[in-house]
Amino acid sequence: MQPRGRGGVSPWLQPEPHNWWQIVEDALFEDIGSGDVSGGVIPPDQTVRWYIEAQQEGVLCGAGIAEYLLNPTSSEPDESGITVERVDGERLTRGTVVCSGVLSARRALLAERTILNFLMMLSGVATLTGEFVSKVEGTGARIVDTRKTVPLLR
């Protein structure tokens, strides 16, 4: 995947998680099954200007998932595109735009729920981990892992 974050930086905090795209594809399929009913009422050529913004303070995690699912394909309208404004590990305040773009309205709706579910869950874990790191700052202790993990997303 071509990095599209600020300055050409990948939105993933490196190292990029192993085989993450298969988990995302499985989650998307679980969500939409045989199709997105709500998207079927939207004209196929309608585009939408979209953005994802933080709803509260925290640490971002999972921006690469948004980039992956909202990156325009060759069949998208010419004006389609994505801009990743923030990358994993960055502290966010309420209202901070994480990414934005223009895309087929059907495709944006299709991916929206899966993206937000991953971003909220992963960013919640990153935010809590950040709190643990702050609490041990200056003690010589180092947080290297938490027990707040989900199978296949460790």
Image (tube, rainbow, N blue to C red):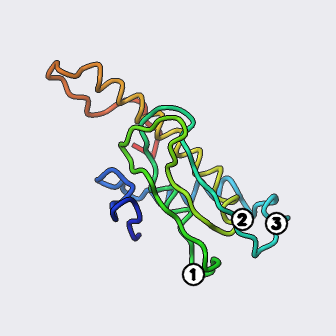
Looking at the picture, which amino acid does disc 1 mark? Answer: Ser
Q: Mark 3 points at which residue?
A: 42
* Residue placed under numbered mark 1 in the picture: 74
- In the shown orientation, is residue 152 left or right of residue 75? left
Q: In this view, does 107 lie above or below 134?
A: below
Q: Where is residue 130 in the image (x, y as percent from the top left)?
A: 35, 30
Tell me the element at label 2.
Answer: helix
Tags 3 and 2 touching, CB below 8 Å: yes
Amino acid type at image mark 3:
Ile
| Quarter of the image where one finds residue 117 | top right
Q: Which residue lies furthest to the left in this view?
A: 140
Residue 37's image quarter?
A: bottom right
Label 2 Cα neighbours within 10 Å, binned few <14 / some 14-19 / many ≥20:
some
- Label 2 vs label 1: CA separation? 15 Å
Query: Disc number at residue 131?
Result: none
Q: From the viewer's perspective, is residue 99 above or below residue 136?
A: below
Residue with the mark numbered 2: 105
